Image: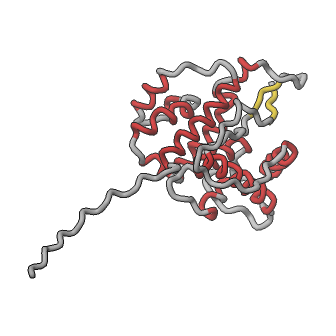
Amino acid sequence: MASSFRPRSGGTRAAPPTGAPKSVNVQPLDEREIDALQDALDRVPAPLEPLDVSMIDGFLCGVLLQPQPVPEARWLPHITDADGRALPASFNATQVHAWVRRRHAELDQAIAERDWFDPWVFELRDEEGDEDDEESSTGPDAVYPWVAGFATAQEFFPDLMRFDAKVLTAPLALLYRHLDPDDLEDADELLVEIESLEPPSVLADAVEELVRATLLLADVSRPLHPAAPPNPPRAHRPTRRR
């Protein structure tokens, strides 16, 4: 069984909510550019361990869901090495970085507007190059790299995870149920929530859940209408005697 990369759409686009930020023109990467990005990542020299394109997509969403913007200088090195180690001077990453910045901008806009986006996931193919049916493409084999990339972002940029677990558990369960339960330490409530979920029946459902979980988490960490601070108590002004 071989794996071939193709972005998969998991559903229809959601309409931007009222009051969403004005869209800017972001040029999405086409399949040729995504393939070229993966080819470039495959040439990153050892011992560095670059993310693959699916992991990059989940990683970028994990970065963009932080309550405060993460400076590019902090997240960009993790694209060409999971631990963020520096590239050798002999490797020119200019084009890699340009492609990743475009995807970052595209995802940032979609998250800000609560709009649909197409996650980059792998699709299994048989030896003749035909796609497997939808049922055999669901589960960890299909979306695990995306979720692993998201989890990598949380490892290095944990501010999202500092929100109240009550508002994080449900959307995180949609993502982390694709990970090995042994990797979820001290997460009893999350594991209980995962156990309560019905597994997706087709790949499109699993992909749609990636988007839904991302936008639900955005409501927590990047609310469209931040709560106004409480009005400060009025200072007591003594009555002036005449």
For the residue pair 113 and 75, the one nearer the viewer reads as 113
The extreme left residue here reads 241
Quadrant of the frame with the C terminus? bottom left
Residue 15: x percent and y percent?
A: 66, 39
Residue 241 picture location, percent across and down:
9, 79
- Residue 180 higher or lower than 197, as above or below: below
Residue nearest the observer in this picture, 127 or 67: 67
| Quadrant, the N terminus | top right
Label total for image = 0
* Residue at 64 percent of width and 43 percent of height: 16
Identify the coloring: secondary structure
Tell me the quarter of the picture where residue 189 sits: top left
x then y, percent, for residue 12:
71, 32
Q: Is residue 96 above or below residue 30?
A: below
Most distant residue in the front direction = 242
* Residue at the extreme right of the image, as rendered: 128
Task: Out of 3 and 239, give the one closest to the viewer.
Answer: 239
Find the residue positioned furthest to the bottom: 242
Q: Which residue is pictured at 72% across the width and 35% down the height?
A: 121
Q: Is residue 237 left or right of residue 45?
A: left
In the displayed structure, 151 sits above or below 132; it is below
Kindly identify the residue that appears in the image at 79 percent across and 63 percent down: 94
Q: For this rendering, which residue is in front, 121 or 119?
A: 119
The spot of residue 187 in percent (x, y) is: 42, 34
Query: In percent of the image, x 28 and y 62: which residue is there?
Result: 232
Q: On the rendered structure, is 177 left or right of 106? A: left
